[in-house]
Amino acid sequence: MTHDYIFNEVETDRIIEMAWEDRTTFDAITLQFGINEQQVIELMRREMKASSFRMWRKRVQGRSTKHVIKSLRFKCSRQRQISGNKISKRK
């Protein structure tokens, strides 16, 4: 990561949580936090245990739902919307 982005603990936890979610795209993370897919991968590698990172990487590798273009799907009306807010509404 180019270290242009410094995240506090809450933001880092939220990025990791979003990256673990199967239906949250990398584009949604980019929109909310301003980091691209490669930077998310580097953050995950730095913040997680090696075995957890490998397990996550194996899960998302080639997963079409992690990319918005490939994941046009039905969206439940109760599903939380991703906004352009810098900080998640969750505390």
Image (cartoon, rainbow, N blue to C red):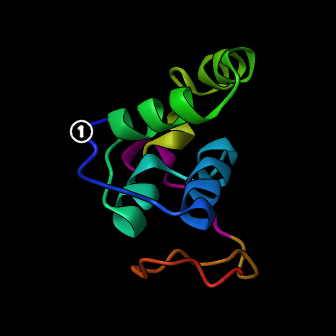
Front in this rendered view, residue 70 or 82: 82
Q: Quadrant of the C terminus?
A: bottom right
Q: Report helix, strand or loop for mark 1.
A: loop
Q: What residue is at 64 percent from the left and 68 percent from the top? A: 75
- In magenta stretch: residue 57: no
- Residues 1 and 73: in front is 1
**Residue at the location (64% across, 56% down)?**
13
Instruction: Give, as a single range, the part of the protein colored magenta.
Output: 68-75
**Left or right of 24 in this view: 5:** left
| Residue underneath mark 1 | 2
Give x and y (percent) for residue 7: 45, 59
Q: Quadrant of residue 74?
A: bottom right
Q: Residue at x 70, y 23 (%)?
A: 49
Residue lying at 52% horizontally and 63% vertically, measured from the top left = 8
Residue 36 in picture, x, y percent from top left: 31, 45
- Crowding at mark 1 (Cα within 10 Å: few <14, some 14-19, many 20+): few
Quick check: is 70 in the magenta stretch?
yes
Q: How many marks?
A: 1
Left or right: 45 in relation to 14: left
Q: In the image, is residue 62 above or below residue 27?
A: above
Residue 19, image x and y in percent? 59, 45
Q: Looking at numbered disc 1 in the image, what kind of residue is underneath it? A: Thr
What main secondary structure does the magenta stretch of the protein show? loop
Q: Quadrant of the N terminus?
A: top left
